[in-house]
């Protein structure tokens, strides 16, 4: 499974659990970027995928510490 597939699958899995606007702020994304991914099916850039992947890894590292 590619990094893109992994990140998109996690985002879709958590769509109803996470708050989109605070996550966009935490990641430094412009307002609406993730909303458009969830609601309009807009594709995220490779840079965005990498940013989200690093953030998810950071969260998991904290969980397993």
Image: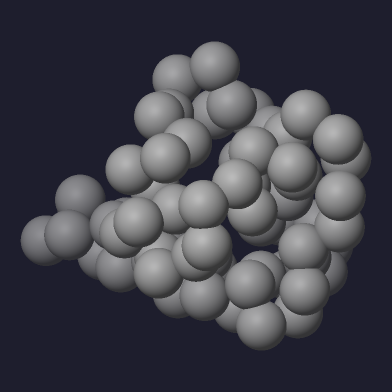
Q: Spot the residue most to the top.
A: 16
Is any part of residue 10 visible from this angle? no
The quarter holding residue 7 reads: bottom right
Q: Nearer the viewer, residue 36 or 5?
A: 36
State the image coordinates of residue 20 (x, y, percent, origin top left).
47, 36
Q: Nearer the viewer, residue 32 or 65?
A: 32
State the image coordinates of residue 33 (x, y, percent, origin top left).
64, 53
Identity of the residue drawn at 52% across and 75% down: 51
Identity of the residue drawn at 49% across and 65% down: 29
Q: Spot the residue most to the left.
A: 65
The quarter holding residue 58 reads: bottom left
For the C terminus, the quadrant is bottom left
State the image coordinates of residue 54 (x, y, percent, origin top left).
45, 74
In the picture, measured across the screen, residue 60 lies left or right of residue 62, that is right
Q: Spot the residue most to the front.
A: 31
Q: Is residue 9 above or below residue 48?
A: above
Is any part of residue 40 visible from this angle? yes
Q: Is residue 24 above or below residue 48?
A: above
Q: Is residue 24 above or below residue 21?
A: below
Identity of the residue drawn at 44% across and 53% down: 24
Identity of the residue drawn at 60% across and 46% down: 32
State the image coordinates of residue 14 (x, y, percent, origin top left).
54, 29
- The image's colouring method is one colour
For the N terminus, the quadrant is bottom right
């Amino acid at each position: 499974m590619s990094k893109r597939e992994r990140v998109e699958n996690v985002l879709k899995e958590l769509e109803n659990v996470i708050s989109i606007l605070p996550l966009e702020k935490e990641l430094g994304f412009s307002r609406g970027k993730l909303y458009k991914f969830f609601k309009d099916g807009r594709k995220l850039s490779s840079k965005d995928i990498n940013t989200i992947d690093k953030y998810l890894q950071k969260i998991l590292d904290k969980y397993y510490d």
